Amino acid sequence: MTNEELSLKTKQALAGALKHAMERKKLSKITVSELIEACDLNRKTFYYHFENIYALLKWMLEQETVEVVKNFDLIVNAEEAIRFVMDYVEQNRAMVNSALDSLRYEEIKRFFYDDLFSVLYGAIEQGEEKLHVKIDKPFKDFLAAFYTEASAGLLIEWAKNPVTQAKEMVIHNLLSIYTVSMPAVLEARGVKAQGT
């Protein structure tokens, strides 16, 4: 087994232990000691791979959701991507609630912001390509931030209180925003690319 494979296996074991612990208690109550004991590792090994438990949680979520969502074409497959994220939340409700109960709203947003921003920024770039337009970088940054703030806020609120809005309604509403407003904004603000 290569060092890279061993490192991945260690990270996956720690992520599994964290997920299992989060089914029983809040993230803030979980210790590095209990994770390394569950994996039969030492403290040094944990800190070789992760700065802290929050870094482990972020890595785990990136592996299980963000990297998958980045592979979706959000212009064409927005519904599939949104549904994937919401299904993940439903299937991991105890873990998600553990994190939500331990982190303040601003921490949660910041925790997911960079990854969600990069996914939505990629969707904007895909939209530019499909519509044969180009928008200036400051507006592209603004647009990605706008969609990120709105999406993160709505998804966090749904995860915390799923009974306030039905899953299908949230999906329908987000799809309307992505598939109707994003192309319209890109066409309105974009400059037609040469040769189109």
Image: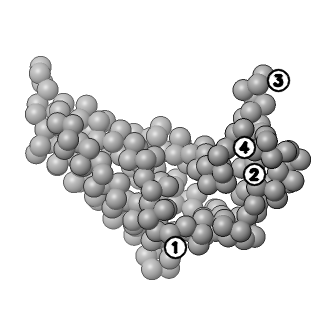
Q: Which residue corresponds to the image point at 67% horizontal and 54% vertical from the top-left?
A: 53
Determine which residue is flagged by label 3.
Answer: 1
Mark 2 or 3, nearer chain start: 3
Tell me if residue 59 can be seen: yes
Residue 171, how many percent across, how many down?
41, 62
Is 38 rendered above or below residue 162? above
Looking at the rendered structure, the secondary structure element under dot 1 is helix
Number of marks in picture: 4
Q: Which amino acid does label 1 sit on?
A: Lys
In the rendered image, residue 95, in percent from the top left (x then y), is placed at 65, 64
Query: According to the image, label 2 marks what residue?
Result: 16
For marks 1 and 2, give the CA distance.
22 Å
Q: How far apart are marks 4 and 2 (CA)?
A: 16 Å
Would residue 94 be visible to someone looking at this image?
A: no
Which mark sits nearer the N-terminus, 4 or 2?
A: 2
The residue sitting at the bottom extreme is: 164
Instruction: Look at label 4 and name its amino acid.
Output: Tyr
